[in-house]
Image (cartoon, rainbow, N blue to C red):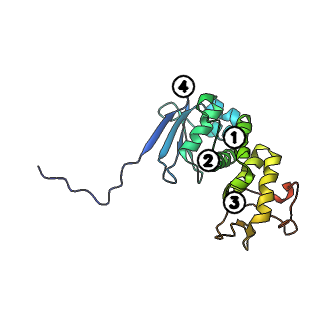
Amino acid sequence: MAATKANGNARPPEKIQRLVIDKNGDIVVRIAADGGFETGLFLVCSRTLRRASTMWDRVIPTLALTTSGRMFYQLNEDGLHWPIFQMLMHICHGHFDKVPPVLAVERLWLLVRAAEKLEMTAVLRPWASSWLSGIRMRGMRSHSLEAASQTAGISWALGDLALFTSATDRLIIEVDEDEDGDLIDPKDSTLLENSLKFPNDLHGKRSPSLLVAYSGWVD
């Protein structure tokens, strides 16, 4: 039998992760493929989302039922991967056995950044002590400058002033700024992910509290 010639213009089938967070859920949330991760489809409870987030509380009442009898929402957030959204959903749905007690700085940064964008930071607070203690145990000097920058954003969002001060003290001493005032690693001039900005009168000086210097760490 002759082989069928492949259509060079045909798009490969979309890879989709289907995740049931609540088997009785009434809304399907779609997370677009991003950063090498597949598309994610989540079956979740709309009432749980509305209690967890002011954003969802605004959005969900505007949604109509689909032919499946459920609501559908396409979530378009740059840098939001389905594994991070999955962790957020387990947290707000009370699946505590599925929430890791320790997270690496980079992964915690992605989680906190997603929660901030979705107005869900409050649901992370019960886990903050466990997550931040893991960062603190290593000591700020053992982290890279990028991790210190991410730690500043994490600790600010989760309300740990001592860790925030430790992270920003190191950044003020060791980092440089580009022409836009963004922080860069002096070794290779790469932009540190966080976009902290420091007023000129504080840059290069050690301060016990840099709350005034910390602005807009999430786009």
Amino acid type, callout 2 = Arg
- Residue where numbered disc 1 is placed: 131
Q: Secondary structure at mark 4?
A: loop
Q: Which mark is residue 24?
A: 4
Tell me whether circle 2 and circle 1 mark residues in contact (CB < 8 Å). Answer: no
Q: Residue furthest left?
A: 1
Tell me whether circle 1 and circle 4 mark residues in contact (CB < 8 Å). Answer: no
Amino acid type, callout 1 = Trp
- Residue where numbered disc 3 is placed: 145
Q: Please name the residue shown 69% across and 35% down the image.
A: 52
Quadrant occupied by the C terminus: bottom right
Which mark lies nearer to you, 4 or 3? 3
Amino acid type, callout 4 = Asn
Measured as percent of width and height from the top left, residue 169 is found at 81, 58
Residue neighbourhood size for the residue with mark 3, other residues' Cα within 10 Å, grouped as few (<14), some (14–19), many (≥20): many
> Based on the displayed image, in which of its 4 quarters is residue 184 positioned?
bottom right
Tell me whether circle 4 and circle 3 mark residues in contact (CB < 8 Å). Answer: no
Residue neighbourhood size for the residue with mark 1, other residues' Cα within 10 Å, grouped as few (<14), some (14–19), many (≥20): some
> Based on the displayed image, in which of its 4 quarters is residue 97 positioned?
top right
Q: Earlier in the sequence, mark 4 or mark 3?
A: 4
Q: Is residue 39 above or below residue 68?
A: below
Q: Which mark is residue 107?
A: 2
